[in-house]
Image (tube, helix red, strand yellow):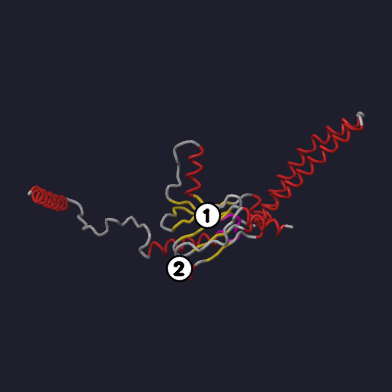
């Protein structure tokens, strides 16, 4: 049953196949998946939601029982029972559908890391795929809720430049956060993965490919004091003289 559901979703929702590795050395690419315990975590959350939904369905059930106990016409009783069965049937079908989506969402979650960048894909109805280069990553942190601690899993949060406070309404702030924040959700080796990403970030930047803020490294060092001021004045005077010569040549 679930296999047919998965194939139907892959066909009609056009879920992409396994993602291609992000830019980098394919030999160093590593694929990570959410831990099987993460599926249990999602099922626990689904169970809470389903229990709340069924509990809400008890209210009309009790009301219908009270009405039937007071005595009503057979035709009305049949209609009430039919409505109750229809509502309960729809709620059960919806809960089973959500459980299948939980399973499919777990299976379609991918994490890829190369020597230059990382790529995360998640989602079923809306597929979200984001790639971060190590030059832009600013912060790595591990988050873990109480249920996650019980199951031995955690989330690795990746933040890039520009992911700080954003002015504007809540929709703009959420959109900016999504563009600059991604999660390795439900992994059982969060610390190991954090160290791997941190090590590859250092290797990427040490190789000269990252942003070292060294754009002025090729400029001569002037130092401090009067000598530095004289050198700077001489350099500015030379630039001004050259600019005047170019202007005169252009006017001719």
Which quarter of the picture shows residue 200?
bottom left
Which mark sits nearer the N-terminus, 1 or 2?
A: 2
Q: Position of residue 113 (x, y in %)?
A: 50, 62
Which residue is pictured at 51% across the width and 42% down the height?
174
Q: Nearer the viewer, residue 90 or 183?
A: 90
Q: Which residue position is annotated with label 2?
A: 25
Which quarter of the picture shows residue 72?
top right
Span highlighted in magenta in the image? 183-190
Q: Position of residue 104 (x, y in %)?
A: 65, 56
- 13 sits left or right of 211 in the view: right
Which residue is pictured at 74% across the width and 41% down the height?
53
Q: Which residue position is annotated with label 1?
A: 129
Q: Position of residue 129 (x, y in %)?
A: 52, 54
As displayed, is residue 167 above or below residue 36? Answer: above
Judge whether residue 44 is colored magenta: no
- 131 sits left or right of 76 in the view: left
Mark 1 vs mark 2, CA separation in Å: 20 Å
């Amino acid at each position: 049953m679930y296999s047919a559901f998965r194939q139907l979703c892959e066909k009609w929702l056009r879920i992409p196949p396994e993602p291609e590795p992000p830019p980098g050395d394919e030999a160093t690419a590593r694929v990570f998946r959410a831990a099987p315990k993460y599926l249990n975590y999602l099922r626990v959350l689904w169970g809470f939601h389903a229990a709340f939904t069924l509990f809400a369905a008890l209210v009309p059930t009790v009301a219908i029982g009270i009405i039937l106990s007071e005595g009503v016409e057979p035709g009305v009783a049949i209609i009430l029972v039919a409505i109750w069965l229809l509502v309960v049937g729809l709620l059960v079908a919806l809960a089973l559908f959500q459980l299948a989506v939980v399973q499919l969402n777990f299976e379609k979650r991918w994490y890829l890391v190369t020597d230059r960048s990382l790529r995360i894909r998640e989602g079923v109805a809306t597929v979200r795929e984001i790639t971060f280069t190590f030059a832009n990553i600013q912060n790595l942190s591990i988050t873990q809720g109480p249920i996650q601690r019980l199951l031995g899993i955690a989330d690795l949060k990746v933040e890039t430049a520009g992911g700080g406070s954003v002015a504007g309404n809540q929709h703009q702030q959420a959109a900016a956060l999504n563009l600059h924040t991604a999660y390795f959700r439900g992994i059982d080796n969060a610390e190991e993965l954090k160290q791997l990403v941190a090590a590859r970030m250092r290797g990427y930047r040490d190789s000269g490919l990252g942003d070292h803020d060294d754009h002025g490294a090729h400029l001569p060092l002037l130092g401090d004091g009067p000598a530095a001021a004289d050198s700077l004045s001489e350099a500015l005077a030379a630039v001004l003289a050259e600019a005047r010569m170019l202007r005169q040549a252009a006017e001719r």
